[in-house]
Structures are given as structure tokens and as C-alpha cells.
Amino acid sequence: MYFDKAAGISGVSQKTLSHMKAPDCMLKVTFPIEIKDKVEIITGFRVHHSRHMLPVKGGIRFATDVDEQEVTALAALMTYKCAIVDVPFGGAKGGISIDPKNYTDAEVERITRRYTVELCQKSFIGPGTDVPAPDVGTGAREMAWIMDTYRQFHPNEVDSIGCVTGKPIPLGGVRGRNESTGLGVYYGIREFVSYPEVQKHTGLSGDIKDLRIIIQGFGKVGYWAAKFFEQNGAKIIGIGEKECGVYNPNGLNIDKLFNYRRSRGSFLGMPNVDIIEDPLEILELECDVLIPAALERQIGLRNADKIKAKIVGEAANGPTTPLANEVLLMKGILVIPDLLLNAGGVTVSYFEWLKNLSHMRFGRMTKKWDELGKSQIVELVERNVARKLSETEKKQVVHGANETDLVFSGLEDTMISACSETRRTAISKDIDYRTAAFVNAIEKVAAVYEGSGIMFMN
């Protein structure tokens, strides 16, 4: 529905749109795993939505509701997400239909490695073919297992470390990857609230310190988004998780919340907060910015008319159904779409992939050279103003960019550019931000299809 709405505005030919809309290929695998003296048949999927750019890119999730339709939809979203932030990947997605909490670590490892074997045998993984990443239910540990399994099949491939991203740092990961999606959410919302037309529409001042924010989901994305907003002065007044929500109109301490939930496994019993037993109710509380950072379809027709936020920033994939999106727009609520706002993860995955292909840590060749040049400037200034900087001041001025600095800088520049492009299209065509983001993505993908020629179409 989102695609068709934008396609009619884009001006792209119907032939190209038809090709773009259909997934290129889908893989469904089943394999037996012996679990506690019985055999379970595990089902896994991998979908390549568009191979207009290679490799294709997309996460692998472990969840019981993983099916072909969901994986295909998320693969399509990855195609448009990569295009919006100018990351030269096609879109893909994968998943295994399990709840990892029902298995031991050793059993999850066996399932992950066997799934990877299936991908290797079908040529659905490789640094130039298909580069998976973490998603719901997976993390750096699973990515390390996938990489190790791939390397057993390709022992002489020099770039084999680039077959997957989101790896631990010692195994070729990039610094800043864990924070990347949450940081991208912060950058994106910061940009939009700075636009005069957004301030006029919402009545917000544009200052991050004036924002009251509610976040649904306290995982990798929600936690880091909350941290960055808190560090920059915003007030996080509500956090929702699957068991309950917590609310305090005076603001929550993110680290205290995180440590409490990690030690107890739940927010229940947390002092100095209001406990909201129905976790979906957190979405309906009054705030300036609502950030759904959990799973799909959290805002639907059942609750869209109860949303009181001025801005909804979609940090999760597909948290708002199409009909609910129309309700939010009719209510005057601005929606910053998922394919733009949570693209920080794939952007930094791109940086990790580049690091793996270059076989060199970012900043290794430039950090000390930058510091030497800055030191010479500081010495020149000190001589001319007759004042010596303190050691602390000098370190702050002279500091050369390390890998984290460069990754965060690249991510910030990417998000600023993508938000600006979306804004310009929305203004020029008088459309909402989601449709504008889709229009930009469709036009970029179409330019590749039409520029390269679509083989055997005629």
C-alpha cells in the first residue's frame, strides 16, 4: 500500500515498477536438529527482494512468527531503506521460526550454523552476494557463528570476514555498530524538529531539551535512542516493554532502568515510577515524540485514534499499519517513517563491510597525522596569544578522530542528507514524509534498473 501510493507520484514507468515490486528470489529451508533426545524440524527463510545492487543486505531474525510473507515484506523495506541513505546494497531479509529462549546456547549455535550451511550451499551468503546482519533475537554472537561457518566453506577467500556484519569487534566488527540504529533515530528526530515547518505544525521549539519522549521497546534500538536523547537534555517520560511499561512525568533515569531490568528481568517493582500493566497503553500517553522501537504492527486501527503524540518516530520496522498511518495523518500527527529513521543500522553495517574489505581499522592511517597537524596549530596560537592551554584543553583540541568518531560522523552526515532529501520531496510534492521517502527510494532504484537495462524483459 505504501509502495503503490508513492509509485503513482514518482513518475517511474509501470514496467520498472512491476519489476521493482516483486522479490527476485526466495529460499525456504527445513532441516532436522536433535534437541533433548527428540528431533525438531527447523524452518528458515532468506529472501532477496532486489539485486539491482550487490551484495544484498538485511538482518536475520529468530522469532516464532517468522514466515515467508513477513520476511519478504522486510526484504522489500531493506531495498528502499538502503536507497534512501545511499547505501549501495540491494534489499534482503532472513529468519528462523524459533524462540531462542526455548533453547540452550549450544542448541542455538547448532541451529544457526546449520542454517548458515543451507545459505552457503544455495549461494545465499557471501561478501559480494548477500551480507546478513543482526535483527530481532540475534546479535553479535550469532553473527560470529555465521562468519565462522562461512569461512569453513571458503577457507581461501581473503574477504570472507565481510560475509556478515554486526560482528564482535575482535572478529572484524566496527566500533559504534551497537549504538548505530538508536543514534540514527536521535539524529533523524533532531533534524526534523529543527525544520521551521515542523515547529509551526507541532508547536515545538526545536530544542531537544524541551522534548518529552516516550519509547516503546527497551532493546538495542530503544535503549540507545533513550540514552542519546537523555544525554542531549531531552526528558524520557515513558518506556514500554513486553511485560509492562514505566512512566514518570518528571523523567526517567535510563541507566537505572536498564540495570534494574537486567537484574530483575522486568520493570515490575521499580521504585519512583508508575507501572503501566498493559504495555500497549504506553503508546497512548501524552508526549511530544512517540518512538515505537519494538515490533511490527504496534499502532493499528485499534489504538491509532488514541495516540496523543505530536510526532511518531518509527524506530522499529513497520510499527504502524497503513490504515493507522492514515488516521495519524488525519489527526495532524507527523510520522517520521521507519525506512528513513532506523536506517542507522544498515548505514553502519555498510561501514563495517567497507572496513572488512579494506582489512584496516578506520582512523589507523590518519589519527596521528591529524593530531600532529592540530598540535602545530595549537603551538602557533599559544605563541601569538601568549597563553598556554592546559593539558585537558590541549587534548580536547588536538584529539584525532578514532574509529568511533569517524563512524558517528559518517552516520550523522548520512542521516542529515537523507532527512533533507525527504523534506524537500515532501514540500515540493505536498505529501507526507513516508510517501516522500518512498518516492525518493523508488526513483533511485529505478535509475539503476533503467540505466543498466533490464535483461530479457522485451
Image (cartoon, rainbow, N blue to C red):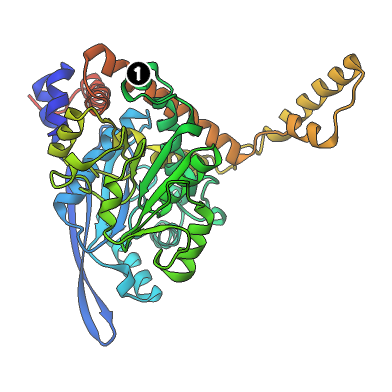
Find the residue positioned furthest to the top.
428
Q: Is residue 195 above or below residue 98?
A: above
Horizontal and vertical percent position of residue 397: 74, 29
Tell me the residue at 28%/39% (across/down).
Answer: 78
Closer to the camera in the image, 77 or 425:
425
Which structural element holds mark 1?
helix
Q: Is residue 439 left or right of residue 257?
A: left
In the figure, residue 421 lies in which quadrant? top left
Quarter of the rendering containing residue 242: bottom left
Specify whether 220 is left or right of 426: right
Q: Residue at x 32, y 22 (%)?
A: 422
Q: Residue furthest left?
A: 458
Judging by the rendered image, the residue that carries numbered circle 1 is 200
> In the image shown, does 20 or 438 lie closer to the viewer?
438
Left or right of 418 on screen, residue 307: left
Q: Residue at x 21, y 81 (%)?
A: 39
**Where is the C terminus found, in terms of image quarters?**
top left
Q: What amino acid type is highlighted by mark number 1?
A: Lys
Can residue 385 be seen? yes
Q: Is residue 185 left or right of residue 326?
A: right
Q: Where residue 98 sits: x, y (%)?
A: 25, 67
Q: Nearer the viewer, residue 44 or 217?
A: 217
